[in-house]
Amino acid sequence: MKTIIAATDFSPVSLNAVDYAADMACMTDAQLVLFHVYAVPMALTEIPVANFDIGQMETDATMLIEQLKEKLLGRTENRVIIHTEVRAGDVLTQLSDYCSKITPHAVVVGAESASGIERVMFGGKTLIALKKIQCPLLVVPPFTRFSNIRKIGLACDLKDVVDSVRVEEIRELVEEFGAELHVLHVSEETRDTFSPKTIEQSSLLQEMLDGMNPKYHFINEPVIEKGVIEFAEKNKLDLLIIIPKKHGLVSRLFHYSHSKELVLHAHMPVMSIHE
C-alpha cells in the first residue's frame, strides 16, 4: 500500500496541508502518516534541560497528534489507515531519515508558516531541504482544498532529460488521476531559434513520455518563473511538477509569487521530484 506522509507543526497552514493529504490518501487508497517533530531546547548553560521537561514535550506532542488523527478519521469516515510518528530533534533531519526507511509515495507540507517545517522549506534553507528530502515533496498553498487533479504541469528546462526526469513517478500520477499532462518549457528561445541541443532533448522527452499524451508548450519569456506562473494561472493547473536542480526553480517561484502578492495561483500545489 502506498504511503503519504503529512508533516505538521500544528500551524493553520500545515493543518490545511494535512487535510489535503488525508483527502488525497482517501481518493488514492493510500495510508497516511502524521509526522511531527518537536524541537528539544538547547541549554543556555552547562546545566542540562530537565528530563521531565523533555518528557512533557513528548507527551504534549503525542496528545496533539492523536487528537489530529481522530479528527481525520472522522473526516475520511475511517476509510484511511492513519499512523502517527512523533520525534525530537531537527525536523528536516528526522523527516529525511524517516523517508529513507519507508520510501513514501509523497511528503505533503504547507507552503507558509511563521514557524516549523514550512518556515524552513521556504526560508533560507529551501535548497538544503530539497536536497535532504529526496522523495516527491508536495507543497500545498494556504486555503487549498483537495478535490481532484485533472491538469498536471511539468516545468522542464530540456537539459539532460534522460537523467533528470523521473518518468515513472510522473506516469503514476497521470494514470492515477486520469489527468492531462502539460509540459512547459520557458526560455528566450522561439520555435525558429531553438538550438540543436534543445531540439534533441525535446525529442528524447517525447519518447520518454510516450503513452501519456502530453501537450507541449514552448513559452518565450526571459523570466522562467513568470512564464510558469502565468501559464498555470491561465490554464488552471491542479498540480505543478518541478525538478529541483542546482539553481532551484521552486524557491524562485515562491519568491516571485510573493513579490506579486500571489500565492502561486492560490489553489495550485507544487511537487518537486528529484532528478
Image (cartoon, grey):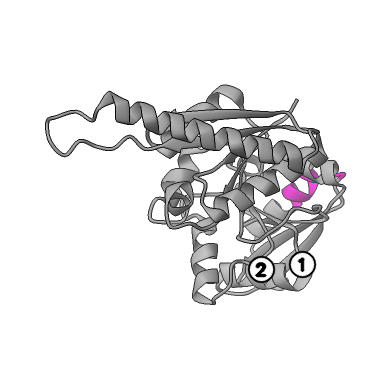
Dot 1 amino acid type: Lys
The disc labelled 2 sits on which kind of residue?
His
Give the side of residue 143 with respect to residue 260, left or right. Answer: right
Q: Is-magenta flag for residue 124? A: no
**Between marks 2 and 1, how big is the CA–CA gap?**
8 Å
At x 68% / y 52%, what residue is drawn? 201
Magenta stretch prevailing secondary structure: helix
Q: Does the magenta stretch include residue 208?
A: yes
Question: Is 268 situated left or right of 209 in this image?
Answer: left
**Residue segment shown in magenta:** 203-211
Cβ atoms at labels 2 and 1 below 8 Å apart: yes
Q: List x then y, in percent, for residue 64.
A: 53, 37
Q: Observer-nearest residue: 131 or 59?
A: 59
Q: Does any portion of residue 5 appear in the rendered image?
A: no
Q: Residue 136 carries which label?
A: none
Quadrant in which the C terminus is drawn: top right
Q: Which image quarter: residue 107?
A: top right
Say the numbered circle drawn on residue 265: 2
Expressed as whole percent of the image width and height from the top left, the position of residue 69 reads 64, 35
- In terms of secondary structure, where does tag 2 sit? loop
Task: Say which label, 2 or 1, has the lower sequence index.
Answer: 1
Name the disc covering residue 236, or none. Answer: 1
Query: In x, y percent, where is residue 90?
Result: 38, 36
Please report the residue visible at 75 percent of the width from the left and 43 percent of the height from the top. Answer: 75
Please provide percent x and percent y for residue 78: 78, 33
User: As rendered, which of 254 and 62 lies closer to the eye?
Assistant: 62
Q: Judge whether 112 appears above or below 100 on screen.
A: below
Mark 2: give few (<14), some (14-19) or many (20+) Cα within 10 Å: some
Seen at 42% across and 45% down, the residue is: 128
The furthest residue to the left:
46
Q: For the residue labelled by badge 1, is the local secondary structure a helix, a strand or a loop?
A: loop
Residue 30 in sight: yes
